[in-house]
Structure formats: structure tokens, C-alpha cells
Image: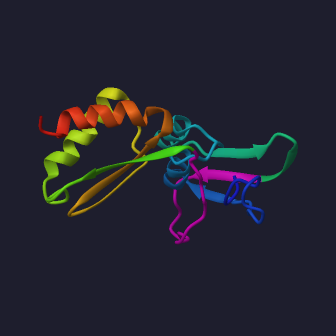
Amino acid sequence: MFSGDPNVITNANLIKNISYEEMLEAATNGAKVLHNRSVSVAKKYKLPIFVKHFRNSKGGTIVEERNGLEEYGPKIISFEKKLTKISLIGDGMFSNMDYMSKIYEVASKMNVKIYMISCNELCINILVKEEQAEEFGNAIHNELIKK
């Protein structure tokens, strides 16, 4: 496991130890090293995971429980390509939590992964996969925009 995709980050470093939580976050956010479900199962049963490169048997990464001497700060940079931003614009967006719950409800029904949400009083921005954006945008429109 590296601190970034070595094909993109030219100075990516090998990570020797990483916690289950950090690896789950990396797997969920685009790192294509381990599937997030495999990390969840290993965490549940406290099984360490040894990640090694198939061409190089030296070195590697151990995924395990956090130890008492945690290292704080960023360890990994991940990328998710081909995302589309959907923006809901109007007064009172941030102060009405019904909008947020409806967005998540529609996403859940449609099996759409929301990569990020940011909001302020006038706007809710949602990042989703490009290929799901139009259908999801239409569903959100039909759910939230008054006819």
C-alpha cells in the first residue's frame, strides 16, 4: 500500500502499517488495493492483512488494529475520476434537514454512492459518478422541486 497511486503520485511512499479504519476509508474512497468488505471482515475477526506486491516479496503493508502509539496526519491521497457535481440552489438549503434526508433516501433507493456533500445556506453540492448523475439529478428534482 502506497501513500498514493504510484502511477499518479511520483513520490508515493510505501506504508508499512495502517489501521483497519484508515484502510477502509482508503478502499471506500478509490484506493484499488483491497476491497472494503475484506477489510471489514478482517477487522471484525481481528485478522491482520498483509498486502504485498505480486512481483516483489520484500516489504509490504500490514493492516491491523490501531496501536496505542497512533500516528496522526494524512497517510494516503486517493483519486476518484469521472465525478459530476449536482447543485441544489435556493434559500434555506442548509437549515432544512429534510432536504438532506430526502437526498440520501433517493440515493439509497437508486443505489447511488454519494462521494461528497457540501452545503451552505443557498446551495447543496453533491458529487456522484458521472454515469449516474443525470438519472439521480432527475430523481432529486422530482422529489424536491415543487411542481
Q: How many numbered circles are shown?
A: 0
Residue ID at (57%, 46%) = 30
Residue ID at (74%, 62%) = 12
Examine the structure image and report whether residue 66 is included in the region drawn in magenta: yes
Determine the image quadrant of residue 27: top right
Examine the structure image and report whether residue 64 is included in the region drawn in magenta: yes
Residue range in magenta is 60-81
Q: Nearer the viewer, residue 89 or 14?
A: 89
Q: Nearer the viewer, residue 138 or 132?
A: 138
Q: Nearer the viewer, residue 119 or 47?
A: 119
Residue 129 placement (x, y as % from top left): 48, 39
Give the main secondary structure, helix, strand or loop, of the magenta stretch. loop
Residue 32 placement (x, y as % from top left): 64, 42
Relative to 145, is 11 above or below? Answer: below
Residue ID at (52%, 48%) = 29
Which quadrant, please, contains the C terminus? top left
